[in-house]
Amino acid sequence: MKTPLEPFDFNRREFLRGGSVASLAALFGMVQTVAQDAKPAEAEKAVTVTNTGVIGLGARGREAVTVLGSLSNGRVTALCDHYPSALKRAGTAAPKAKQYKDYRQLLADTEVAAVVIATPPHQHREIAVAALAAGKHVYLEVPLAGTVEDARAIALAARDAGKVVFQPGLQERSHPQSHFLLPFIRSGGAGRTIKARTQWHRKTSWRASSPNPDREKELNWKLHRETSPGLVGELGIHQIDTINWFLGQRPKSVMGFGSIQHWKDDRQTADTVQCIYEYSDDIHLSQELTLTNSFDSEYAMIYGTDAAVMMRENRAWMFKESDAPLLGWEVYARKDSFYKDLGIALVANATKIVAQGKNPMEEAPYPNPPLFYALESFLFNAHELTTGTKDFIENFGADDPKALANHLATLKLLPAPKWKDGLEATVVALTANEAVVSGRKITFQDEWFHV
Amino acid sequence: MKPPRLLLPNAIAPAIALTLTLAIALGSAASSAFAETLTRYQATPASKVTVNGTSTIHDWKMEGKIIGGHFEIESNYPLETSAGKLPDLKVKSSAEVSIPVQSIKSGTKRMDEVMLEAMKQPEFPKITYKLTELSPRTGEHKSGDPLEFVSKGELTIAGVTRPVEMTVTVEKFDGNKLKVVGSTPIKMTNHGIKPPAPNIALGLIKVGDEVKVSFEWITARKMDAPK
């Protein structure tokens, strides 16, 4: 559920709670591990490395540059931003990368095999469609675009793109934790699903400072109605996608509420948002996001008849009802107290970790940020698809596209969302934002999800 | 194919002539001299190569689905699997086989990376094999069983060529296809490959030097275009 760090993001409560050893360890443990992995020397890069360009070098784009540098199969060879100081700043993390002011120059660079697009969503369509047309593998941040129409145009281009990977930035879909929890929840580990809830709480203005009014407007696209997908479109989209995925369905309708409660500057987008999504079987998801209070940070919950499951960053707990059947393993599992409730830790490979004489909870289960797993999948799959196609054509020729497609279908890829998943999450999130802005209940139409 | 030297103009550089002479000398005598009597089968999809190995922790397996190249065998050789005794002479034949190293997969990203590095893949992207001799295994063979041959050839892995002798079966199917099946043990160190000892989550693993390579190679005769 990790979302990109904002420039002025400061989680005061988290810091004040620093007296807790666990949160300090988590805080610094994370930093340490990432630092160790941060920059494997060039010699340590795997031969499967894919040369990648990053387009759009705001906070998210710079995070992508760092993560790509830390991946054994990642290498940043090109950077692009039309704003010189953004280019310069990102260049310090990838000093050997070529720098371009215009994305078309980057797309014309034949050494670049893959691109990560991290521009504001309203600029996605033109760049993403051109990148696919240029034969690049494309990792596109979500929402796919600023409007449903643009998102569908991108999805169409991705569908027809042929032998390249198009991966929407639904990073939770590549996270090992999700792939451990998904079968647990889908198989009824928490009983029959009753409802779901997500929250994203921070105290941050969402505003970046800038040297002049033009740049100010450009930089703070999130605060202007015509360019902003709102809190729910920009941040809530990851949580909605996780819930949709785990429930195995998409919502039928959405109601939204939004207001500017605290940040009364000239912004046009709500700093506090609530949405209710209606699913089949009378299941509802309530989603809360605010920039005004950081209490309890961010997490997602699925409530079942036997237990509630809480997903928090890269960890999860199960809170069992007293009348729930005994699963067995939970007797030995580690428990954490949450006020009067006991959370049973859901840890992948817990028994294997114990067998190695380690404590499953002391081992950071997934030491890297979610974007790491997402980009690892992206580059791995891009490499597999490229080499799989090349090897096949070199040995058997290109006369039989069906045989080639059959061969490519046998490639074992890492888990990653497809254009369809990206379109679905984008349509749901942008529609939810529309419900927030208009104060209306909106019923989803099937055709919005097709290209 | 006629011996190419006859086609060369007199003015040709001696170096090129020498290269061609060598090429002929290296090729199987049968394939060059009697080319017109051979039928060519071209590699097609649906092949499989499997590498079974060991390590200090557990056995492992890698698999590839691409085996390229071609196989030629004398056109009137009885490849039908009816009962009888195979002619016990050497079979006029040739084969050149090529496998992209990167197409052999373990199913895990890290192990694939380790393997590609150990095999010096960027420098030697292909495993190649050249058949030098093919003779039927003596003895009766039962109806329906694939034909068995003893093959001799040269296997090049990571740039190092070693002779290899193994039993292969050849089976005709679908009218115009051949399935060649065989397996052979290979020592990595014979090909200058240091058995990897990667440091992974479970600790240090040391991979055993000897692996068993098995393959099912599918080739097809190009059907004659209608005249």
Image (cartoon, coloured by chain):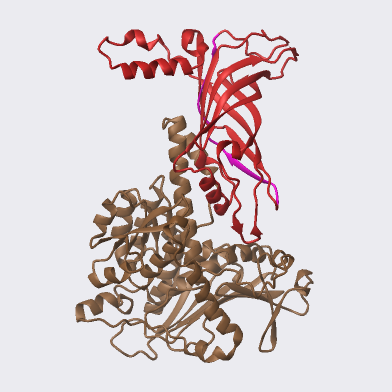
The C terminus of chain A sits in image quarter: bottom left
Q: Quadrant of residue A347?
A: bottom right
Query: Is residue A390 among the parts visible in the rendering?
Result: yes
Residue placed at 31% from the left, 16% from the top?
B14
Residue placed at 44% from the left, 61% from the top?
A41
Colour chosen for chain A:
brown
Residue placed at 58% from the left, 51% from the top?
B111
Q: Is residue A362 above or below residue A406?
A: below
Residue B95 in percent (x, y) is at 53, 21
The span shown in magenta is B58-75
Residue A377 in percent (x, y) is at 49, 57
Q: Is residue A358 left or right of residue B109?
A: right
Q: Quadrant of residue B215?
A: top right
Q: Is residue A400 above or below residue A242?
A: above
Residue A231 in percent (x, y) is at 41, 77
Residue B6 in percent (x, y) is at 35, 7
Colour chosen for chain B:
red
